[in-house]
Image: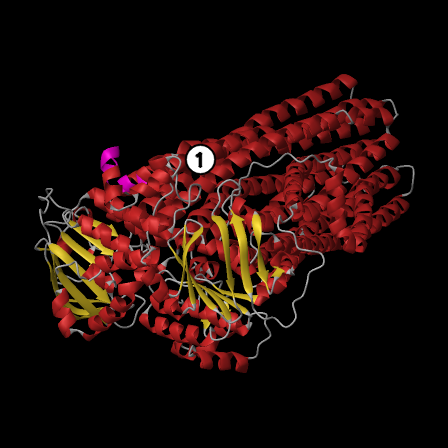
């Protein structure tokens, strides 16, 4: 999927040379490392010339042998020169490789860091448009395409150019017409290599796509192995896997057809040139137009031409792919966050007890047609506010707007009495603690995850926050307690545990605003209730917004907002809503009915 | 979607592991004709590549420099050679093309076979196995490791075989032409081989270092991307930018060290090639002067030397591929050899006319032998009875279901269906008899209908009938295209409640004799909840059912309630009985009422 979209938006990148992109992304690196590049290119060109000189010495030797004008010591001298040149070549080859390929890696790193720094600044709308997979592809595939073009691409292009010009030059010096005959098949090779490798690239992309499908299929099956077994789906799924596998095999064979053509074709074309030289060159020697030494040197030069000819097609593809990728990377690093982030001339004073004021707030997701929230007018002053409503009523969107992950027009939201769009993002956010619906933790120790917003916090503070979120006891059952690693390579926590950790993380920050988007949904009602009852004191003087569908929790708040279809259906305290709002009433009846007996089971 | 740089401490599989080769050959047995064809082609290609320089040589010696012959005859001889040359290069073109195709064809199908048997083997392994393995690792076996092995068939066998054959051929030719010079040239073989192997090993280490750093970089990136909002809200951009740059610098460092390595070794083979030419010119030239070698032979020697070093260079690359392929093969076969602990009986009993009696008898079980999760659990469900299991998390309810499905075998005790130990039943039959509705559901990327039917062979009508009877059609009708709505990745996302409904429909399609329901713990939307209640009421009627209950409405529907705590049954009876007992159950109810309103 990802590959498809990126291929689509790359289309126009192929047509023109993206000068702006080259200038903005690559020029700084080229300028910074100009000496390195120049040194590398110089080494490369010298190597090419030295390589061309070696056949001259061979020619000399063969000619002298034919004319019997050479002595054994003369031969030894020739051989010594060849070895000496070869030593020098080894040294120079190391030099260009280290300088130029090394440069491409340095450039890669510069661009990679630039991409990352940019991503960190982007807003939720940006991430809505681009999936994690897409962004990962930018930083791996696209980046390596650019790196390849700037490294091996440059080397191959320069090398091919110098080698072919020089080799052709030498060949012309020997015999122009023979040169023409020998080179006749070469353009054909360059052309077909280019066509074939473009096709190969496309087919290979299909293979890769199917490979990831296979991977995903295996992963999802193995991860839910219990379910597969419970439903005796083993044979059924093996069949499905078989179908995917067969399709994958076929795509691979389609790649093989092209791959199987490229090398033999190159050999064929090279050998055809050789055939020309053998026959026509042989005739020329018989006619005494050229010497046998010329003939042998000619063959050597022809061998030298095969690689540059193949390289031309290859380089063209490499550069094109590099430019396309560059274009995509450029699109990425020049995308603007839709959230205005003004810079304060002087650091403003922090708000002591800020609240939110929403006036006619309307919000539509870029991908959506109709607004998710419309004409919301609300006051969220210090105190506890509950937000409830059916799925899709806009509760989470409201939270995202409050924590400034989504953009808003001017005049819709005041924070601490100030227009939010006039406040720097970091400033606003530094007032807000947030617990999202889906608890997001990082691969690190538990302690580091809790102190995420306050890295300087001491162990006691961390423990206190953990205890307030009722996760301390769970942590203590782990072998390494707070130093336990969690995440990919560490211990797996249950959903409820993760949520409580996320809550502890927000509590530790002790910020004047706390927004909890259904943050303990995977925790049973009793524990949730207990946690919040304990936090009531902690919440004093703060603006706390809790999204929940649990009546018991909502009834603890001072002010409950019932959202329906993106508008406020009603607001007020528990008693008020119980008396007036039908949705709230039905939720109450339903939950009380279960509640009065049911939660027995849950603790 | 991708496996970013798979870096695993691979075992050093030795190339001489005959056992391994035998097993690989076993999988390729069905394709022996193809392989044989590839070998024949290989022989042809080798012969042809070696003949070409020979043709040039005979052209030089027999025609070009044969000044004693008349010109016309020399040209005619040259033309014969040229014609032959042309025929061979065309032959080589087709032969190489077919060889690559045939080997790819064989390799791909062999790998498909290995992949299928591994996948099927994995799906049939028991759960204790999966508890000790990371999914990512197993997926790697199925994908990257098999891919690695495939490399062996395609690039390696072609090149390795062709190259070795060519090396051998060249040596033979050289010796045939001029033994002393050939002997001199063969010094280069061990030198080149040592350099090559040494380099391959160093390169492998560097590659591994690079890949593991890339994996770190990528997993940091992906974690950052998935937690970007939180990162921004907690103001951690600067820290994570620094971490990323450190990782990135580490990557750069490793790639540069690899470049240095390649920069040192790649020119070395070139050097050897030049040195060989110099040697031929000096020594061979001397031989020519003494008339022990013709000029044509000298030129041929120089050409052969070039052919000689090309395979040596490739061997160094292929060497590491073969090695990693062998390591992959070893890991794959190891996995294929893993046996389930849970024995499938060889002579399974089939139960005809199932009554549906279910008995748990003196069960003793722990995931680890000395950490028991269930202590002496015994109870019986009469045919058609509904029993609710009630208890706190960790009381062992879910474990009981796992034992009933024979995901694990108990340390002691038995589970009996119609008085027959489930260990004597065929696993598949057992799991068909017992239909479980779990909280989680495995969703195929397909339509809802396909997801319900799966491999049961039910017709659409039958499904609709079941759905209507249980009232679940209300849930289906809510979806944009009803039963034909695509669900799963890229399709409609199902809510927790809807997932449980799907699970329900799936199980009812299979019409199991015994129903097990693991009720959703999480709050589910009211609508699904209502539908679910009706479905439960309808389908549990007259069917032996075991419910891990979380809702009182469900508990009250049960004929019998079993209260579990810490792996033991602490109370049982009907709702009223238990309440009047004033024990565990009643206490929990009372506690809850206190907390409530």
Spot occupied by residue A14 in the image (x, y as percentages of width and height): 46, 58
Residue at x 46% of width, y 56% of height: B398
- Magenta highlight range: A448-462
* Chain letter behind tag 1: B
Apparent side of residue A151 relative to residue A549 in the rendered image (left or right): right
Q: Nearer the viewer, residue A103 or B127?
A: B127
Magenta span contains residue A217? no
The answer, for residue B551, to whether it is visible in the render is no
Identify residue for label 1: B252
Instruction: Please name whichever residue, B155 or B536, is drawn nearer the observer in this view of the structure.
Output: B536
Q: In the rendered image of this protein, does residue A305 appear above or below residue A594?
A: above
Q: In this figure, what is the number of numbered marks?
A: 1
- Foreground residue among A460 and B82: A460
In percent of width and height, residue A110 lies at 38, 40
Quarter occupied by the C terminus of chain A = bottom left
Colouring scheme applied when the structure was drawn? secondary structure
Q: Is residue B266 left or right of residue B48?
A: left
Q: Give residue B419's position: percent from left, percent from top.
A: 61, 62
Does the rendering let one see residue B342? yes
Main SS category, magenta section: helix
């Amino acid at each position: 999927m990802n590959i498809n979209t990126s291929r689509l938006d790359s289309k126009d990148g192929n047509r023109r040379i993206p000068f702006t992109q080259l200038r903005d992304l690559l020029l700084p690196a080229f300028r910074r490392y100009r000496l390195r590049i120049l040194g590398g290119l110089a080494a490369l060109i010298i190597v090419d010339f030295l390589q061309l000189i070696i056949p001259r010495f061979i020619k000399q030797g063969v000619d002298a042998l034919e004319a019997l004008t050479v002595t054994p010591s003369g031969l030894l001298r020739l051989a010594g020169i060849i070895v000496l040149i070869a030593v020098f070549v080894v040294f120079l080859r190391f030099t260009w490789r280290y300088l130029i390929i090394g440069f491409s890696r340095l450039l890669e790193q510069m661009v990679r860091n630039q991409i990352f720094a940019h991503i960190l600044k982007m807003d939720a709308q940006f991430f809505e448009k681009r999936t994690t997979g897409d962004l990962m592809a930018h930083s791996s595939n696209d980046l390596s395409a650019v790196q390849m073009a700037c490294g091996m691409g440059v080397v191959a292009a320069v090398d091919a150019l110098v080698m072919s010009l020089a080799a052709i030059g030498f060949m012309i010096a020997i015999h122009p017409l023979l040169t023409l005959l020998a080179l006749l098949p070469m353009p054909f090779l360059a052309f077909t290599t280019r066509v074939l490798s473009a096709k190969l690239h496309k087919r290979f992309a299909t293979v890769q796509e199917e490979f990831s499908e296979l991977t995903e299929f295996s992963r999802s099956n193995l991860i839910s192995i219990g379910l597969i077994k419970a439903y005796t789906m083993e044979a059924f799924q093996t069949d499905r896997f078989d179908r995917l596998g067969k399709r994958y095999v076929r795509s691979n064979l389609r790649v093989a057809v092209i791959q199987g053509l490229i090398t033999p074709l190159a050999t064929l074309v090279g050998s055809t040139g050789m055939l020309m030289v053998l026959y026509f060159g042989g005739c020329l020697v018989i006619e005494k137009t050229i010497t046998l030494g010329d003939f042998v040197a000619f063959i050597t030069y022809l061998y030298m031409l095969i690689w540059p000819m193949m390289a031309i097609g290859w380089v063209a593809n490499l550069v094109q792919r590099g430019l396309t990728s560059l274009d995509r990377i450029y699109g990425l690093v020049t995308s603007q966050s839709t959230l205005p982030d003004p810079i304060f001339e002087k650091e403003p004073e922090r708000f002591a007890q800020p609240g939110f004021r929403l006036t006619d707030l309307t919000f539509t997701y870029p991908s959506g047609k109709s607004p998710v929230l419309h004409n919301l007018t609300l006051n969220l002053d210090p105190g506890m506010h509950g937000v409830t409503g059916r799925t899709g009523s806009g509760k989470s969107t409201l939270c995202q707007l409050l924590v400034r992950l989504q953009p808003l027009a001017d005049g819709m939201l005041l924070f601490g009495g100030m227009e939010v769009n006039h406040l720097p993002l970091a400033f606003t956010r530094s007032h807000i603690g947030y617990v999202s619906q889906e608890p997001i933790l990082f691969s690190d120790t538990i302690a580091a995850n809790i102190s995420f917003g306050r890295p300087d916090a001491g162990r006691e503070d961390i423990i206190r926050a953990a205890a307030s979120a009722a996760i301390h006891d769970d942590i203590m059952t782990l072998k390494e307690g707070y130093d336990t690693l969690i995440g990919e390579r560490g211990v797996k926590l249950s959903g409820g545990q993760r949520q409580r950790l996320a809550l502890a993380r927000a509590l530790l920050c002790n910020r004047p605003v706390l927004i909890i988007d259904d943050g303990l949904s995977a925790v049973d009602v009793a524990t949730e209730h207990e946690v919040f009852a304990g936090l009531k004191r902690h919440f004093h003087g703060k603006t706390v917004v809790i999204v929940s569908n649990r009546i018991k929790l909502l009834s603890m708040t001072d002010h409950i907002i019932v959202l329906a279809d993106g508008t406020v259906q009603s607001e007020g305290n528990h008693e008020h809503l119980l008396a007036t709002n039908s949705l709230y009433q039905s939720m109450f009846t339903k939950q009380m009915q279960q509640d009065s007996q049911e939660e027995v089971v849950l603790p | 979607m991708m496996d970013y740089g798979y870096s695993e401490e691979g075992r050093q599989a030795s190339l001489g592991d005959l056992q391994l080769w035998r097993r690989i050959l076993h999988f390729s047995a069905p394709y022996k004709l193809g392989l044989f064809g590839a070998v024949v082609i290989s022989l042809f290609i080798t012969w042809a590549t070696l003949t070409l320089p020979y043709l040039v040589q005979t052209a030089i010696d027999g025609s070009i420099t044969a000044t004693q012959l008349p010109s016309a005859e020399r040209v005619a001889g040259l033309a014969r050679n040229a014609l032959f040359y042309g025929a061979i290069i065309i032959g080589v073109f087709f032969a190489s093309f077919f060889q690559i195709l045939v080997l790819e064809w064989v390799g791909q199908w062999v790998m498909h076979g290995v992949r299928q048997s591994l996948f099927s083997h994995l799906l049939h392994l028991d759960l204790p196995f999966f508890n000790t393995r990371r999914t990512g690792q197993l997926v790697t076996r199925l994908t990257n490791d098999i891919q690695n092995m495939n490399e062996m068939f395609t690039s390696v066998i072609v090149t390795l075989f062709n190259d070795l054959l060519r090396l051998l051929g060249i040596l033979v030719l050289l010796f045939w032409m001029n033994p002393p010079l050939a002997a001199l040239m063969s010094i280069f073989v061990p030198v080149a081989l040592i350099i090559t192997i040494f380099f391959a090993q160093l390169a492998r280490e560097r590659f591994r270092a690079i890949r593991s750093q890339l994996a770190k970089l990528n997993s940091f990136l992906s974690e950052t991307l998935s937690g970007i909002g939180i990162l921004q809200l907690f103001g951690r951009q600067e820290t994570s930018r620094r971490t990323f740059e450190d990782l990135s610098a580490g990557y750069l460092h490793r790639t540069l060290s690899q470049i240095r390595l390649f920069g040192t070794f790649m020119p070395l083979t070139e050097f050897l090639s030049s040195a060989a030419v110099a040697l031929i010119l000096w020594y061979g030239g001397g031989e020519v002067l003494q008339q022990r070698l013709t000029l044509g032979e000298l030129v041929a020697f120089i050409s052969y030397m070039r052919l000689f070093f090309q395979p040596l260079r490739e061997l160094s690359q292929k060497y590491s591929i073969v090695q990693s392929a062998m390591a992959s093969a070893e890991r794959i076969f190891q996995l294929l050899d893993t046996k389930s602990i849970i024995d499938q009986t060889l002579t399974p009993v089939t139960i005809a006319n199932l009554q549906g009696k279910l008995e748990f008898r003196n069960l003793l079980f722990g995931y680890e032998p000395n950490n028991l999760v269930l202590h002496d659990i015994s109870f019986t469900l009469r045919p058609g009875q509904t029993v609710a299991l009630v208890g706190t998390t960790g009381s062992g309810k879910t474990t009981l279901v796992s034992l009933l499905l024979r995901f694990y075998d108990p340390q002691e005790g038995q589970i009996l269906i119609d008085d027959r130990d489930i260990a004597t039943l065929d696993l598949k039959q057992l799991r068909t008899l017992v239909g479980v509705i779990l909280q989680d559901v495995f969703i195929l990327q397909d339509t809802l209908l396909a997801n319900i039917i799966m491999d049961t062979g039910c017709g659409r009508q039958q499904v609709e009938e079941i759905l209507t009877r249980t009232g679940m059609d209300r849930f289906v009708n809510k979806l944009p295209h009803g039963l034909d709505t695509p669900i799963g990745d890229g399709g409609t996302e199902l809510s927790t409640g809807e997932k449980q409904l799907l699970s329900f429909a799936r199980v009812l399609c299979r019409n199991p004799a015994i129903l097990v329901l693991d009720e959703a713990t999480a709050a589910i939307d009211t609508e699904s909840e209502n539908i679910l209640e009706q479905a439960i009421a309808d389908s549990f009627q007259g069917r032996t059912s075991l419910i891990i209950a979380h809702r009182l409405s469900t508990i009250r529907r049960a004929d019998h309630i079993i209260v579990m705590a810490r792996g033991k049954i602490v109370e049982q009876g009907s709702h009223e009985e238990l309440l009047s007992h004033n024990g565990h159950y009643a206490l929990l109810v009372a506690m809850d009422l206190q907390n409530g309103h």
